[in-house]
Image: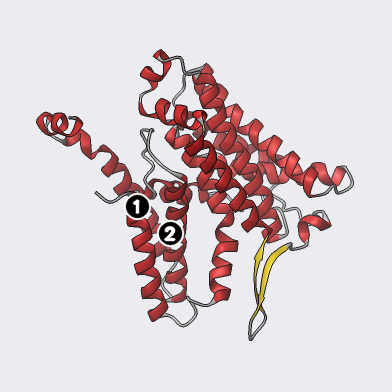
Amino acid sequence: MASPEGVLALLIVLLSAFLSVATDSFLSLQNLFDLLNNQSVNIIFAVGLVVVLIAGGIDISFSVAASVVQYITVVLLMQMGGGNWAVGLLLASAVGIALGLFNALFIHRFRIVSIIVTIGTFNLFFGLLMYLSRGRSLYNIPDWLYDRVAILSIPLERGSATLYLPVLAMVAMVSATWFILARTGLGRQIYGFGSNPDAARRSGINVAWIQAFAYGWLGLCAGIAGLMQAHIVREVVPNALYGRELDILAAVVLGGAVLGGGRGSVQGAVLGVVLLALIQNGLNLLGITPFAFKMIVGAVILIAITASNAERLLPESLKSRKEA
């Protein structure tokens, strides 16, 4: 049977071919670079979330946590006189990890189901942010965060196509996450714990460390993604990332991650984000209402959850044959 990554790659190729014929601007370098720039934040979120899903958990608070990171980081930087990229990344990473570990503490120490914990922290983080910020955006951000950092610019007949710093940050986080999951013992332990938590405990895997790493890594990704989002839009809007978590979750499960844990990959998460981005971009170019994209995201979540539970509906004889 074809892997989820292979199926997604084929769908991306077919959809790209269709949009190239159906629209005049899809295959332009400007549009493709814009897609990469715009989706870099979502891909950073996705590779963080896939680690949590593989470990058997779920987190819906990461996009709100990224908003909190944006706000705290910029406020602290302005009080420090502005800072620079190194200080900004350090602060955003530290705040993001702290918020991730806050989730891990309740999930591990008090044995609360992860979705319940993150529903609670989703509301806690967002409520506190809106209360303390009064819902006001921050337009006065440091110059180094405001000024666009181009990493690749190609002149075109009209203007230029440019890739910006968030794409480089995305590549770094994707590479680091892939290396941890595919090339380290920690990655194998995360897969093992997600597949069978009881067996993992009996084999001596440090469960507290696995859960702390998974949620802390997602927190780190949320911190960096939040700072990159502020760099892209050149301001801090408290509710700018609110609601994005479901799109990211849909993309990651579309990429082969299973809500029960033990399955998923960085490649699948990236391809899932790319496929949904192409669908959204194609709908925009074709002039179709954006609400259609929301319907597609909802359908993806329902189909993925149904597929992940379909095995339970199989007769016992078929289950035994499959396990054998």
Query: 267 or 83, which is in the foreground?
Result: 267
User: In the orientation shown, which residue stands out farthest toward the right?
Assistant: 81
The spot of residue 170 in percent (x, y) is 60, 52
Whether residue 202 is visible, yes or no, is: yes
Displayed quadrant of residue 280: bottom left
Residue appearing at x 71%, y 57% in the figure: 231
Label 2 sits on residue: 276
Is residue 297 positioned above or below 90 on the image?
below
Displayed quadrant of residue 201: top left
Q: Report the side of 233 relative to 289 (left or right).
A: right
Labels in figure, total: 2
Residue appearing at x 38%, y 66% in the figure: 13
Q: Report the side of 126 relative to 1 (left or right).
A: right
Q: Are marks 2 and 1 in contact (CB under 8 Å)?
A: yes
Q: Report the side of 164 relative to 49 (left or right).
A: right
Which quadrant of the rendered structure holds the C terminus?
A: top left
Name the kind of residue labelled 2 in the image: Leu
Name the kind of residue labelled 1 in the image: Val
The label shown at residue 300 is: 1
Helix, strand or loop at label 2? It is helix
Residue appearing at x 62%, y 37% in the figure: 125
Whether residue 59 is visible, yes or no, is: no
Displayed quadrant of residue 95: top right
The spot of residue 323 in percent (x, y) is 20, 30
The spot of residue 182 in percent (x, y) is 47, 38
Is residue 89 positioned above or below 293 on the image?
above
Helix, strand or loop at label 1? It is helix
Query: 91 or 64, which is in the foreground?
Result: 91
Q: Which comes before the other along the chain, label 2 or label 1?
A: 2
The spot of residue 35 in percent (x, y) is 54, 65
| Marks 2/1: CA–CA distance | 10 Å
